[in-house]
């Protein structure tokens, strides 16, 4: 196992996501969100300023005030909903970036021997580094669960994670690790997109 302090710093791979890039991406996304939120707030303020004019118009033309207020409230609700949607999309993008360098390992039983199993696995796909203090179980532990919880592993860089994925082909034929799989750490929307791509490839292969 190599000492991380003595590692030689090498140029980043084109596919590698650095902390600065993640920070810049979050900063850019946040800036875009703030601009849109400012526009929403400005729209609400404009509606509030217009309310006095609307009330005066109601008196002059005897327009149904209930209908006008309902319309104003509807526009306000839409503006709030739009802001919440933008915030959700931003959070989803940040979560996706956080998982960029992670791997998920499936099929390792939740026993005291799991450390030995992980050691065997990593000796093949990531022999130059230690996996200790880098992994955690995902989700709550349930009694009599049909499957063990996945294990999430944090990898220092995208380049190293890519190399580990490539090394997984060496697991073929290793009987002690049978039933264990290594996957990218994806959010739910990514998982669904991945399933759809696999289905399309399967259908194309059949035809």
Image: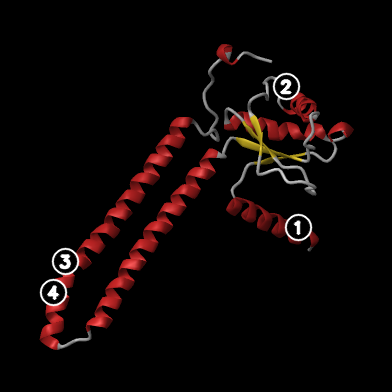
The mark nearer the N terminus, 3 or 2, is: 3
Report whether 145 appears left or right of 34: right
Alpha carbon of mark 1 to alpha carbon of mark 4: how far? 62 Å
| Residue 53: mark in rendering | 4
- Residue positioned 67% across, 44% down in the render: 140
Report whether 123 appears left or right of 59: right
Where disc 3 sits, the SS reads helix
The residue identified by callout 2 is 127
Front of the two marks 3 and 1: 3
The mark nearer the N terminus, 2 or 4, is: 4
The residue identified by callout 1 is 202
Q: Quadrant of residue 77?
A: bottom left
Where disc 2 sits, the SS reads loop
The answer to whether 42 is drawn above or below residue 130 in the figure is below
- Residue positioned 88% across, 34% down in the render: 173
- Residue positioned 72% across, 42% down in the render: 149
Residue extending farthest to the front is 143
The residue identified by callout 3 is 49
Contact (Cβ within 8 Å) of mark 3 with mark 4: yes
The mark nearer the N terminus, 1 or 2, is: 2
The answer to whether 164 is drawn above or below residue 184 in the figure is above
Neighbourhood count class around disc 1 (C-alpha, 10 Å): few under 14, some 14–19, many 20 upward: few
């Amino acid at each position: 196992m190599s000492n991380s302090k003595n590692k030689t710093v090498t140029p980043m791979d084109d596919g590698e996501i650095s902390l600065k890039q993640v920070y810049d991406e979050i900063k850019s996304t946040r800036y875009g969100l703030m601009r849109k939120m400012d526009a929403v707030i400005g729209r609400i303020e404009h509606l509030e300023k217009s309310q006095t004019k609307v009330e005066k118009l109601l008196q002059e033309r005897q327009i149904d005030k209930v209908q006008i207020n309902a319309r104003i409230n509807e526009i306000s609700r839409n503006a709030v909903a739009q802001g919440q949607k933008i915030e959700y999309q931003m959070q989803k993008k940040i979560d996706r970036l956080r998982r960029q360098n992670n791997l998920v390992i499936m099929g390792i039983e939740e026993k005291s021997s799991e450390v030995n199993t992980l050691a065997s696995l990593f000796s093949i796909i990531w022999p130059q580094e230690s996996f200790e203090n880098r992994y955690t179980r995902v989700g709550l532990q349930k009694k009599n669960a049909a499957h063990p919880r996945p294990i999430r592993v944090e990898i220092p860089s995208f380049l190293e994670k890519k190399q580990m994925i490539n090394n997984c082909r060496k697991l073929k034929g290793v009987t002690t690790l049978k039933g264990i799989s290594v996957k990218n750490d994806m959010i739910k929307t990514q998982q669904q997109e991945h399933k759809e791509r696999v289905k399309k490839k399967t259908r194309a292969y059949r035809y």
